[in-house]
Image: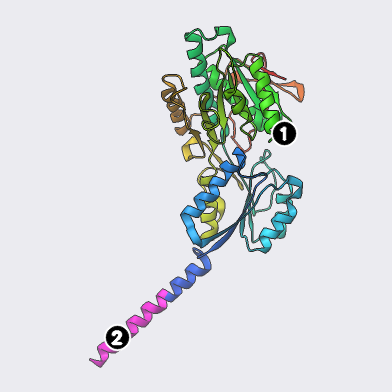
């Protein structure tokens, strides 16, 4: 009997030793118990862009609860990034997310090799040399822009069919911040989505020279409406264009297609649909990686280019928001779903393709023939198409 007790004791000791070793292994090279995460916003959550980005923080809170300490800094201008960034590191952040375009992030990253810096991409990252702890990411917004263009095109087609406008009045408007490739790529995809339904449609673009100015965005939208645009979309950060559409008086209604969040609350009678980049898949996966002490790019599911990652509908990185069934033309949901299904199957070459010639606004001698097609986000998460389509897009 004594031998049995000794054997049982040895067995328990071995099991306890194995368990202790396993727990020690997990603690050293496996999942962390807690983590401090930082967010630095270029604006605050009252603007659609930052509100949309903050949904990723909310997703982290739902997933991890009190295992995470999340610290945020809002309204941080690009050239004022250094102080809040160092402050978050001092407070123990081991991964920090940024939705601004500051170059300081990459420059400061080498000073803190133990911290992961994750910034929404603001430039073509192809062949860029960056610190190993600096990461960029962005959803492939052109896909959702194209689908939102389909919704706009369906509405324009309905207006033509019902005699509200003539076929030669199929004019869309776009309120844009700056003539960057990110903005040009987005509004081009939007128009090509419109023209997939209404081939004769054209578009007018007005730049505001700022990402976030309610007054300027609303004024630009109103100018486009006065010029005869029947649908307005935007790549700016406020609800100004949506309000301008909703407040339009007269016989003709002007419809709005939003970006980053639904505009149905501020424009219930004119909001068609919105599209948004979904930041949650990347942000949650990046935190998963740090919690598990793994490389971020080994955990994130998307198209990986070094420390840069992108994805579209197939990974849930972009989505359509709040199709207004009271306003949208019949069949709009089905038309949108058909295009989304193509994107999910990996077919993307139909967007930037057709009988068009694009002109680089910074160099008229630089043109691009879209008959041969253009694949967006092929090597980088930052949109690179930067040609204004001749004859069908006018910029003011």
Residue 26: horizontal and vertical position, in percent?
48, 67
CA separation, marks 2 and 1? 76 Å
Is residue 86 depicted above or below 138 in this figure? below
> How are the colours assigned in the image?
rainbow
Is residue 24 depicted above or below 379 in this figure? below
Residue nearest the viewer, comparing 42 with 308: 42
Tell me the quarter of the image containing the C terminus.
Answer: top right
Residue nearest the viewer, comparing 58 with 370: 58
The secondary element bearing badge 2 is classed as helix
Quarter of the image for residue 92 reads: bottom right
Residue 325, numbered label: none
Figure disc tally: 2
Extreme-left residue of the structure: 1
Q: Which residue is mark 2?
A: 7
- Which of the two discs, 2 and 1, labels the residue nearer the N terminus? 2
Is residue 95 depicted above or below 174 in this figure? below
Residue 336: horizontal and vertical position, in percent?
46, 26
- Magenta stretch contains residue 6: yes
- Report the residue at 55% width, 43% height from top: 279
Magenta extent: 1-19
Residue nearest the viewer, comparing 184 with 29: 184
Residue 210, numbered label: 1
Magenta span dominant secondary structure: helix
Residue 75: horizontal and vertical position, in percent?
69, 47
Tell me the quarter of the image containing the N terminus.
Answer: bottom left
The secondary element bearing badge 1 is classed as loop
The crowding category of the residue bearing disc 2, from other C-alpha atoms within 10 Å (few below 14, some 14 to 19, many at least 20), is few
The crowding category of the residue bearing disc 1, from other C-alpha atoms within 10 Å (few below 14, some 14 to 19, many at least 20), is few
Residue 153 appears in the figure: yes
Q: Nearer the viewer, mark 2 or mark 1?
A: 1
Quarter of the image for residue 240 reads: top right
């Amino acid at each position: 009997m004594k031998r049995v007790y000794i054997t049982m004791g040895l067995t328990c000791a071995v099991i306890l030793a194995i368990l202790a070793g396993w727990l020690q292994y997990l603690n050293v090279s496996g999942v962390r118990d807690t983590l401090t995460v930082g967010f630095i916003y270029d604006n605050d959550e009252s603007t659609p862009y930052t509100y949309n980005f903050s949904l990723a923080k909310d997703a982290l809170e739902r997933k991890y609860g009190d295992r995470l300490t999340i610290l945020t800094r809002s309204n941080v201008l690009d050239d004022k990034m250094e102080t809040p960034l160092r402050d978050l590191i001092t407070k123990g952040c081991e991964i920090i997310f940024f939705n601004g375009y500051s170059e300081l992030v990459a420059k400061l990253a080498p000073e803190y090799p133990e911290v992961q810096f994750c910034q929404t991409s603001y430039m073509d990252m192809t062949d860029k040399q960056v610190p190993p702890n600096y990461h960029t990411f962005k959803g492939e917004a052109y896909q959702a822009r194209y689908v939102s263009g389909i919704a706009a095109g369906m509405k324009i087609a309905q207006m033509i069919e019902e005699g509200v406008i003539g076929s030669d009045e199929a004019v869309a408007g776009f309120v844009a911040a700056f003539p960057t490739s990110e903005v040009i790529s987005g509004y081009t995809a939007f128009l090509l989505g419109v023209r997939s339904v209404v081939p004769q449609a054209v578009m007018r673009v007005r730049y505001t020279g700022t990402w976030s100015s309610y007054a300027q965005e609303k004024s630009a939208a109103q100018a486009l409406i006065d010029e005869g645009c029947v649908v307005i979309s935007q790549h700016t950060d406020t609800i100004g264009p949506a309000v301008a559409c909703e407040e339009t008086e007269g016989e003709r209604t002007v419809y709005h297609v939003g970006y980053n969040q639904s505009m149905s609350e501020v424009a219930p009678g004119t909001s068609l649909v919105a599209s948004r980049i979904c930041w949650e898949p990347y942000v949650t996966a990046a935190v998963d990686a740090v919690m598990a002490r793994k490389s971020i790019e080994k955990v994130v599911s998307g198209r990986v280019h070094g420390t840069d990652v992108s994805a579209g509908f197939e990974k849930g990185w972009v989505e359509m928001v709040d199709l207004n069934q009271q306003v949208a033309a019949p069949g709009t949901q089905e038309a949108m779903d058909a295009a989304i299904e193509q994107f999910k199957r990996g077919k993307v070459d139909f967007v930037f393709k057709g009988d068009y010639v694009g002109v680089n606004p910074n160099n008229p001698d630089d043109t691009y023939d879209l008959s041969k097609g253009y694949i967006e986000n092929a090597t980088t998460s930052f949109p690179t198409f930067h040609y204004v389509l001749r004859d069908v897009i006018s910029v003011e």
